[in-house]
Image: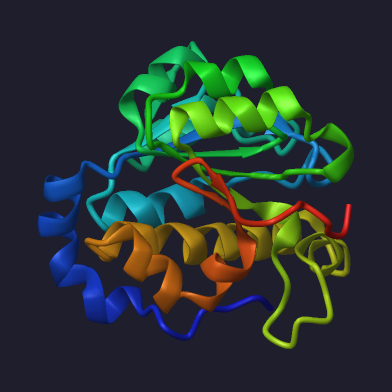
Amino acid sequence: MITDDNYSPETQREAVGQATAHRNFAVGFLKGNTLTPAKDIVITPQCVKKLVDSEIPVFIERKLGKGADYIDLDYADVGATIEEEPARIFRNAKIIVCLSPFTETEIWNLAEEQIIITPFPEDLTTPKLLAAIQARKITAISLNLIQNVEGDEFLQDIIHTKEGPWVASAALCNTILSLIFPLVFNDNLSYALQASPLLGKALYSYKGTLMNSGESHT
């Protein structure tokens, strides 16, 4: 399983109130998913609950759990805010997660210096998309650049080896959380990227500066 030993939610939980108040690191989840072909592999309510329990505001696009029999009420019950339109998530969340690549239009709709966690397939990365990332000073973490600790297996392959959609979803969610928590708990973005090997390896762009060509497993 992909892990980040430099982060322990239990040991850093006391600092989260101050960190989120200072930086307003709300997290938003969009419902697109092309990272995994199986529709029943999704961001789960259990994943969202871990963020909410750490006092991190979470915004969910309606029907996020469609395909896995999770309804909007399941996410609302653990404390997430359900949004009908992605534009409201763009406005309210500092970190936005989507399991499908962002379009050029979506990048332009982001606020300056937002952080996105999403796939960046090489064949879908265009000059116009890169120009939008640069203009908006976006920090992007690419899900298809994420490897295991040994560096010999990619996230998509790890997910597909899990038996059953629930186990696969749990593996995906653990990885997403290991990306989000260092960004929230570290007051300095640059330090968070240096301190977390998983984040550093998956860094696609830093405040609009391209850090990786996107040559990865797709």
For the point 70% across and 22% down, the residue is 128
Q: Quadrant of residue 11?
A: bottom left
Q: Relative to residue 165, is residue 193 depicted above or below?
A: below
For the point 42% across and 23% down, the residue is 90
**Whole-percent x, y for residue 130 in the image:** 66, 33
Query: Image quadrant for the N terminus?
Result: bottom right
- Image side of residue 83 versus residue 4, left or right: left
- Image side of residue 21 versus residue 200, left or right: left
**Whole-percent x, y for residue 56 in the image:** 28, 48
For the point 40% across and 77% down, the residue is 195
- Image side of residue 23 versus residue 51, left or right: left
Q: Quadrant of residue 30?
A: top right
Q: Relative to residue 200, is residue 180 depicted above or below?
A: above
Which residue occupies the foreground of this view, 30 or 209?
Answer: 209
Question: Residue 102, can we see it?
Answer: no
Which color scheme is applied? rainbow
Q: Relative to residue 155, is residue 97 depicted above or below?
A: above
Question: Residue 154, can we see it?
Answer: yes
Count of numbered labels shown in the rendering: 0
**Whole-percent x, y for residue 129 in the image:** 68, 27
Q: Quadrant of residue 8?
A: bottom left
Which residue occupies the foreground of this view, 183 or 2?
Answer: 183
**Whole-percent x, y for residue 207 in the image:** 44, 44
Which residue occupies the foreground of this view, 65 or 120?
Answer: 120
